[in-house]
Amino acid sequence: MAKVMMKGNEAMGLAAIKGGCRAFFGYPITPQNEIPEYLARVMPEYGGVFLQAESEVAAINMIYGASGAGVRSMTSSSSPGIALKQEGITYIAGAELPCVIINVMRGGPGLGGIQPSQADYKQVTRGGGNGDYYLLAFAPENLQETVNIVKEAFDLAEIYRNPVMIAVDGLIGQMMEPVDVDMEIPKREIPEKTWATTGTLGKRERNVVNSLYLDPQALENHSLKLKAKYDLMREKEQRYELVNVDHSEIVIVAYGTMARICRSAMEILNEKGINVGLLRPISIYPFPEKAFAELPSTVKGLLTCELSTGQMIDDVKIANNGKLPIGFFGRTGGMLPEPEEIVDAVIKMIGGMKNE
Amino acid sequence: MSNVLFKRTEALTSKEFSYCPGCTHGIIHRIVAEVLEELNILDRTIGVSPVGCAVMNYEYFNCDMQQASHGRAPAVATGIKRVLPNNIVFTYQGDGDLASIGTAEIVHAAHRSENITVIFVNNAIYGMTGGQMAPTTLVGQKTTTSPTGRDPRHSGYPIKISEMLATIPGATYIERVSVHNPQNVRKAKQAVKRAFEMQIQGKGFSMVEFVSTCPVNWGKTPQDALNWLVDNMIPYYPLGVYRQPEAGEKNE
Amino acid sequence: MNSEKINCAGFGGQGVMLIGQLLAYAANEEGFNTLWYPSYGPETRGGTANCSVTISKQPVNSPVISKADSIIIMNKPSLDKFEDKVRPDGKIFINSTLVNKKVNRSDVEVFYIPVNDMAAELGNPKVANLIMLGAYLESTKLFEDEVIIKLLKKSFGENKAHLIPINQQALQAGRIFIRQ
């Protein structure tokens, strides 16, 4: 199918429907409002449920109920709203329910601002709520990648029985790009939802959706079961792109909109005769540690670039394991750097390494 | 020829209750369970457990259950009912859960007239956490966090949930009951039955509030607790129907 | 054309977002890669609004435009904000009805187009943005009017189909102004 121009938020809404989502519960917050607005219009055409909840807290708990009843469910919000949803998210992870959460990130802390940001990286990649759990989390860079991942997210959520978060910065939600929402995604075997509470109809044992384990041994066993899932994710779901890393002394590590800005910086650097590579995490949990092992020995340093004061850099340090020097460039609060700022950071880093 | 005079309801599992001696949760569970069985809806019912003393009642009701976070049972029930409109969905919540942390969720579930049934057990105290003051704690009542008795100048007056929800246009059926004697137990069961019938008929939000005891945290014997309920709780929380559809019509 | 980067700025309600969107939609129709992104939030409601459009044969990388090839300026505050954001030898299109100031730079090509006056002459003040778009398209030779009209027909639907001719006239008026 030909690509059509869509706004990021609307494209994510349509992608959710194409991914089988039939229940959406949300609450207004900028810059993600076009997702609920779009689904309020379109979801009824697909026979699905759209409901604006009284709060983010209520919305995520409605997701718990609907997902527990076996229906592909999604909520969306932006940073402060995602903070409010953490209660429900940890329950959903604990009860091993699938669901998809879109986080169109804005600047923080507190009420912060409404411009694009990646300052929720740690909240997204460390679970966010209480307890020993993680979300499967993706951070795509353009709309085609975003819609493909939103569609896949519903399959992955059911395969792992775990919430999947798509974390994009506000720009991806607000921008328009040509996109094909019907592009094929990998076919996966989806397990039957034998656990869903749909009424026994006298045909099966009753199902219970629950995250309470008062016996510590039972809770430890449950946590170890969850950990095994996260280990499996780390083995199977690491996603990344390596660009031009051969013959590059410096490799930039960046994701989302920041990665796109870095790509433009790489072109400018290339014109100046400086070869720079890009390691772009697409999954941020699991963090693509495998990508670092693929870097050739010619790489002499890593430059982490983020729309924050430095959050992913900790994962870069873990993955790098002390091997290479790591530099950092960040803008935050909703400020977007121009490619030239990255160019300067790269040149400065090369200069610093030569002086050592 | 022998007649069966009493048998355990199918709607309860064989799991033993974890409630304290003299607590009225047991009777209330029985009432709800018997109604689910008598209305022949058990196999399409999904219950939602609260946080509080009844947190583990997903082990007691013999139907599909979801356990919700504190106060959010009406939101969870909304999620279930919206995607499974032909199923029967109920929540079972205490006064800390419903009248304190979950006021937003209960008010808006009633406001949207979600076609669910809420069983609200009000014993004027936080039981499971050890007897702290609840929004429903009576004036002068001593709890671990109102050690000299609830002072309305400090903590406000006890909140009357049934009266409050009855002001909401979307609330279809609201009744307050008690189970302190057999006569009231029978009345309470009628109320619960009516509430579930409202849901079966698609009439919208129904809630039955039980004024209830907590002998352990009130520091009373079960009988003294029931007497205290009659003398103190019921005068402040009068029993009766607070809202119902007129002549079988859906509430406007 | 290999690539074109445009900033478009003005008051909320002047249709600056639409100018950018039409360019992006047209680019997609014509098989280019493109990316449109708006300023968003309170500033778009009554304050200044702007959007960035990149049109390219190559995949679009940075959505952030450091130096635009062209800027479209619909009011005075936007000129102050964006004058330095156009590259040397780039183009500035100015709504001279509302901007009574001249551009300070001498290394750019400037077009002063009284689009509000021209729209009033056409009998519909709302088409000032389409006059500006016509002028821009004439100068850059980016797209034919037919592409824009096709997009407008799709977006207007039957209810607003009667507005197509005035929009067509507006695009033409912009082109004629540049030709003269």
Image: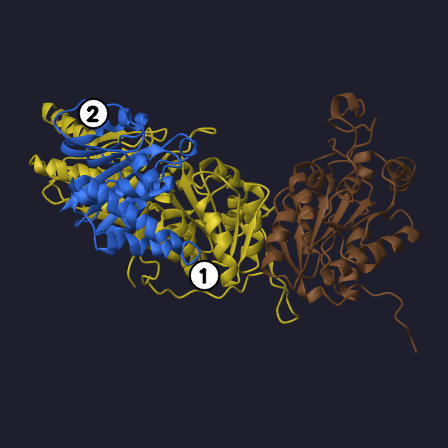
- Packing grade of label 2 (10 A; few <14, some 14-19, many >=20) is some
Query: Which residue is at a point 9% across and 36% down the rendered structure image?
Result: A274
At numbered mark 1, what does the secondary structure look like: helix, strand or loop? loop
Is residue A187 left or right of B88 when viewed as pictured? left
Relative to C98, say whether A71 is above or below: below
Badge 2: chain ID: C
Q: Position of residue C88 (x, y in %)?
A: 13, 30
Is residue B232 left or right of B99 when viewed as pictured? right
- Chain A visual colour: yellow
Instruction: Give a yes or no on whether discs 2 and 1 share a subunit.
Output: no
Relative to C15, say whether B143 is above or below: above
Residue topped by disc 1:
A20
**Nearest the camera: A110 or A212?**
A110
Task: Examine the rendering and report whether any part of residue A317 can be seen.
Answer: no
Residue topped by disc 2:
C103
**Nearest the camera: B216 or A41?**
A41
Q: Position of residue A214 (x, y in %)?
A: 61, 46
Q: How many marks?
A: 2
- Chain C visual colour: blue
Q: Position of residue B217 (x, y in %)?
A: 79, 35
Measured Cα–Cα span from mark 2 to mark 1: 54 Å
Occupied quadrant, residue B102: top right
Q: Amino acid at mark 1?
A: Gly
Q: Quadrant of the N terminus of chain B?
A: bottom right
